[in-house]
Amino acid sequence: MRFLAHRKQSQNGAVKKGQPMSVSDNIESISQEIKRMCDHVGVAEARPRLIAVSKVQPKERVVTALEAGHREFGENRVQEAEERWTDLKADYPDVRLSLIGSLQTNKAAKAVELFDEIQSVDRAKLARALAKEMDKQGKPLPVYLQVNTGAEEQKGGVLASELEALHQECLSLGLNVVGLMCIPPAGDDPSLHFALLKKFAKNLGLEKLSMGMSGDYALAAAMGATDIRVGTAIFGERDYR
Ligand SMILES: *Cc1c(COP(=O)(O)O)cnc(C)c1O
């Protein structure tokens, strides 16, 4: 299946804008670009994981990615993920699903059941609900704390000033906190937010940095991202109608 993928701010000269591309070509060229960027700046650690954000995308596009061998996917809503992935996970048992969107405590049980990691932990109440469910289901999933680095009112994520307390709370609950995640404010220079996230992670002794989306994944890779979450540049524009 082919469609137009809009590649915002891509540094990659090999892919011409507006040229029809397949999902698997997109994954390949983005992975190459990330690899080149890491090599270029000498990021020594393992390559970042490319999480294909499949929210709102038609199932055929997701299946194309699966058939091309991709196994890391991100979804931002529990119910949508459940509808899409219950069957697909049975067909592709080695898929890893990341929850990257805000989570209500009453959906914690479902989230722990369905996902392989939670990247959007941003408050103590949610941390408690997740810890309880992971205990109950015997599924101690890795979690990331989402940081609202731009202190935007409408956005999820813990404020920088409350991050340390939340981290402590998570540790005392026995949660396996592995890293931090952020979504920079639209219009801001993302590098400021990536740098902040990196500093916070270092202060807390956390290793994983989930940062970078379609418009800034190359920059994120250069700045040490370990997880890069790309939707549009892989699957094309989301159709919210
Ligand atoms: C939708 C979404 C993405 C992917 O955004 P694109 O710009 O389509 O790459 C990444 N992270 C989060 C948290 C998202 O909700």
Image (spheres, helix red, strand yellow):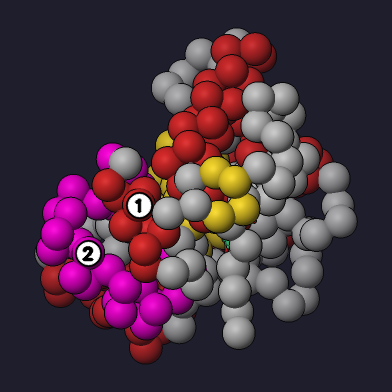
The numbered dot on residue 64 is 1
Which of 235/145 is in front? 235
Alpha-carbon neighbours of circle 1 within 10 Å: few (<14), some, or many (≥20)? some
Q: Nearer the viewer, mark 2 or mark 1?
A: 1
Tag 2: residue type? Answer: Leu
Element under disc 1: helix
Alpha-carbon neighbours of circle 2 within 10 Å: few (<14), some, or many (≥20)? some
Residue drawn at the location 25% of the way across and 51% of the way down:
95
Q: Which residue is mark 2?
A: 88
Image region (quadrant) for ligand 1: bottom right
Please identify the quarter of the rendering in which residue 175 is found. Answer: bottom left
Residue drawn at the location 42% of the way across and 41% of the way down:
24
Number of disc labels: 2
Q: Tell me if residue 211 comes above or below residue 110 in the rendering.
A: above
Q: Is residue 17 left or right of residue 124?
A: right
Residue drawn at the location 52% of the way across and 24% of the way down:
32
Span colored in magenta: 69-98
Which of 180/63 is in front? 63
Q: Position of residue 122 (x, y in %)?
A: 54, 67
Please identify the quarter of the rendering in which residue 201 is found. Answer: top right
Tag 1: residue type? Answer: Thr
